[in-house]
Image (tube, rainbow, N blue to C red):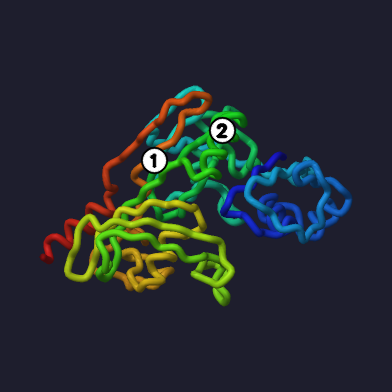
Amino acid sequence: MKILIDENDENARLDAYLANLVQDISRSKIQCAIKNGDVLINGEVKKPSHKLHEGDFIEFEPSTESKVEIPAQDIPLDIVYEDDNMLVVNKPSGMLTHPTTTERENTLVNALLYKYGNNLSDINGEFRRGILHRLDRNTSGLLMIAKNNKAHEFLAEQIKNKTTIKKYLAVVKGSVKDESGVINLPIGRHPTQPHKMAVVEGGKPSITEYKVLERFKNATYLELNLKTGRTHQIRVHLSYFRTPIFNDTLYGARPEKVKTQEQVLQAYKLEFTKPFSDEIIKLEIEPDEKIKKVLKYLRSQK
């Protein structure tokens, strides 16, 4: 197993990260493997408590009896772009990007395995075949998928160097004061609720640009540009200013009369350099059904 660490897993403990990734091996066994030199970080042996950094390369081969099969499932894929080395899919709201400890079916990876089999990068392990970056379960939109490891490294370097452009659409509760601006606040794990992220002192630098597209009585329609890619970044930044994303109950929004599948947030625009060329690929999709539904409701209230 070869794994390239992205910015979302920076500062995670090596043993905890592997125990979460390799689902059927206990953390104590993972720690023994690390101490025995069976795990390499950038070609070197490290301690179980070693903190990971973006760009670290992990090499680890779990025992064959511990490997978990991820089923290939015939789930329709909305492919927006494809070439010999990669594709971009429009992930629907409600779908996990990849399997987890408790859910190993009906994810984007299950669908990709059915269509592409082994023709997907495996740098991030079996649970994340082809996956370069992630979207929350209830966030829809554009995701890049690598078909091979060389393409994965090419695209991952763009993400690391912040040359990939990722823009989102969101409807938030409340009135955003300025027509445009930049939110530059550090994000880390919530101090008392570990399933959430929060603006915290000493967190990872996190930058979100925003622009108002339309205003309503008690809501605002925004375009957002991610300059960094922290877990739940947009949701945390907007919630911090008491303008949580519409129906994002995890981050402070109250349930609304118009029902949607949690947060009204979509990755609608993506720009990147095509692997092994200088060609710039620019992709944009229409607002999804959640956004259309909420906008229709808000406009009817004007």
- Badge 2 marks a residue whose secondary structure is helix
Q: Position of residue 149 (x, y in %)?
A: 62, 31
Q: Label 2 neighbourhood size at 10 Å, few (<14), some (14-19), many (20+)?
A: some
**Image quadrant in which you'd find residue 211:** bottom left
Residue closest to the eye, 224 or 251: 224
What residue did someone put label 1 on? 270
**Image quadrant in which you'd find residue 255:** bottom left
Tell me the distance, in whole angstroms, between the alpha carbons under discs 1 and 2.
Answer: 16 Å
Name the residue type under label 1.
Leu
Compared to residue 219, the image places residue 29 above or below, namely: above
- Badge 1 marks a residue whose secondary structure is strand
Q: Label 1 neighbourhood size at 10 Å, few (<14), some (14-19), many (20+)?
A: many
Left or right, residue 132 beside residue 55:
left
Query: Looking at the image, which residue is at 52% across and 39% down?
Result: 158
Residue closest to the eye, 92 or 35: 35
What residue did someone put label 2 on? 154
Q: Position of residue 200 (x, y in %)?
A: 53, 71
Query: Looking at the image, which residue is at 33% across and 73% down?
Result: 254
Compared to residue 281, the image places residue 109 above or below, namely: below
Left or right, residue 7 beside residue 263:
right
Task: Assign the C terminus to one quadrant of the image.
Answer: bottom left
Residue closest to the eye, 115 or 134: 134
